[in-house]
Image (tube, helix red, strand yellow):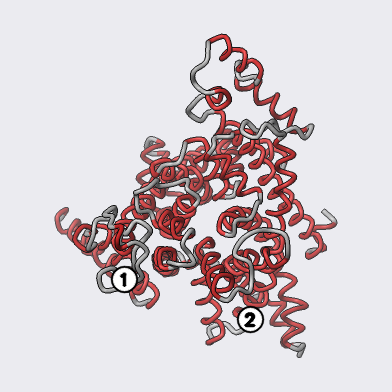
Amino acid sequence: MEIVRQAKIDQYSKNVFLDFARRLFKSKTACFGAIIIFIMLFCAIFAPLIAPYEYDAQKLEDMLKPPSRQHLFGTDEFGRDIFSRIIYGSRISLQVGFVAVGLSLIIGITLGALAGYYGGVVDFIISSITDIAWAFPTQLLAIAFIAALGPSLVNIMIAVALVSWSGYCRMVRGQFLSLREQEYIEAARVLCMSDMRIIFKHMMPNSLAPIIVMASLEFPKAIIVESSLSFLGLGAQPPTPSWGSILSNGKAFIGEAPWIAMFPGLMIMIVVLGFNLFGDALRDVLDPRLKN
Amino acid sequence: MVPVILGMTVIVFLILHLAPGDPVDLIVGPNITPEVYQSIRQKYGLDKPLIIQYFKFISHVLKGDLGKSILQQRPVSELILMKLPVTLEIGIWGLILSFAIAIPLGVTAAVKRNTFVDYSCMTAAMFGMSLPTFWFGLLLSYFFAYKMRLFPISGYGTWKHAFLPIITLGLTDAAITARIVRSSMLEVLRQDYIRTAKSKGLAQKVVIYRHALKNAMIPIVTLLGMRIGWIMGGAVMLEIVFSRPGLGRLMIDSILARDYPVVQGAMIVLTSSIILGNILADFLYAVFDPRIRYK
């Protein structure tokens, strides 16, 4: 009987997932966004196979060459192939996106869950800190963190995580404030379940939808903040091929070699567009109330 | 508001004071005698506990004293007063342009919901949202300044120097703002009083601009307060793109040179201007919603 019951649950879960996937990919914008994300992931994972040259391979006789068959996106002031640097740069953007969003999720969800579940003094302290962090403009706060930590790729990931957690915290707190009054939570308390078990086994799964949507929409913001900081010289240091730093190099040669700045910016725009489109479609499927 | 301001000063103070590295090394370099090292720490108050340093810092800030630049040996407030107008010029005009574009665009998209006009507006807004501000600035600079020579490539002084940065900031912010204006209008257009106004036979323009938009303005004014922070961040970026000698450029150069008093002072001034913007937004609530005036 138990085996049959488990098999029915597994079948139901599979059907729910298939139904979700069907509804999601019914949307053309979701498909378009997913294709862009897939291409970016593919480039990042198989960069050494796709890129025709190493990202730091210099050839001074080829410096500042326009796009051609040998160099699809042209070359920079050191003769480095821009196409190869952009392919390798996708790894940087993905790394920053995943690490920064992951870290900010951990911080935001933990604090939001504690504030929403316990309430009282805990909620007051965490909400006050969250409101202050939320009031700070993202880019300026990230710049302040980089000023303290020093320019580097790892510090950018930390800075982006530290400026993004407050949104998750507010979201999770709001969800938990309404969920903790539900009868099944009261029943769990009556059954003497520990607070951590109630939070992670019962309340967290019911809060996942808006968190997933928010994370999908924060990912492109992390990419933009990283490329902005690298553009300012506060991020990935040479010769690391961050899209922002390639763009920053290109600024000095905008007149004679505009391709150095054009292509990385175009890549940032396409990837961010892909994530935004996919995130919007995900939001429409998972929680249409968030549309407004 | 007061706890937020105090919290911001604490964060700015802590971020820079807890940074690795010794500020004394920046002032005189690492190769000094222990006696000189101690006297410099005493002179700059670095030997006191952090909480005493913070209260001393706050008391100076309230008197308008933001310290002295380690590199330039000039008062930080003097440097900031020189640079702030350059940043505010593109920040304020960029915000005005953004709302001047976003409000009509968002209203049109909402009124003509699910038509070609709506889809075009929102597609344009989606592209605008995905556009990195600094890249868009470079594109405009290349086409209109370098190629067509209609505007100067960089610098500050005339309206021509400010035109491209303002357009860049205004258009990129308008994309995000238009989506929110559309959402807000859709919410209001669904209301019963709008249906009543239409069934009374009022012209569509009267229904939209006299009834719907006025009620949709509350979330839009909230947005104004929130966007000010984004606009100031964008203005900082564009000063690097267009080589404008503003507060953003001063801050970035100071970060790279580890001139912390300048970074601290610039952060406080920028965040204070954002808070003032939010206070202005609070006053505007009373303009658009008479019920708030009487509370």
Q: Is residue B140 left or right of residue A193?
A: right
Closer-to-camera residue (B238/A35): B238
Relative to A120, is A222 above or below? Answer: below
Relative to B252, is B176 above or below? Answer: below
Let me know if residue A213 appears in the view. no
From the image, tell me which residue sits under label 2. B108
Relative to A108, is A282 above or below? Answer: below
Residue A137, position as x, y percentages in the image: 59, 50
Q: What residue type is labelled 1?
A: Ile
What element does badge 1 sit on?
A: helix
Q: In this view, does A155 lie to the left or right of B259?
A: left
Residue B173, position as x, y percentages in the image: 60, 65
Query: Residue at (15%, 55%) from the top-left corner?
Result: A1
From the image, tell me which residue sits under label 1. A35
Q: How far apart are marks 1 and 2 (CA)?
A: 31 Å
Give me the chain letter of mark 2: B
Question: Do the dots labelled 1 and 2 sit on one chain?
Answer: no
Let me know if residue A262 appears in the view. yes
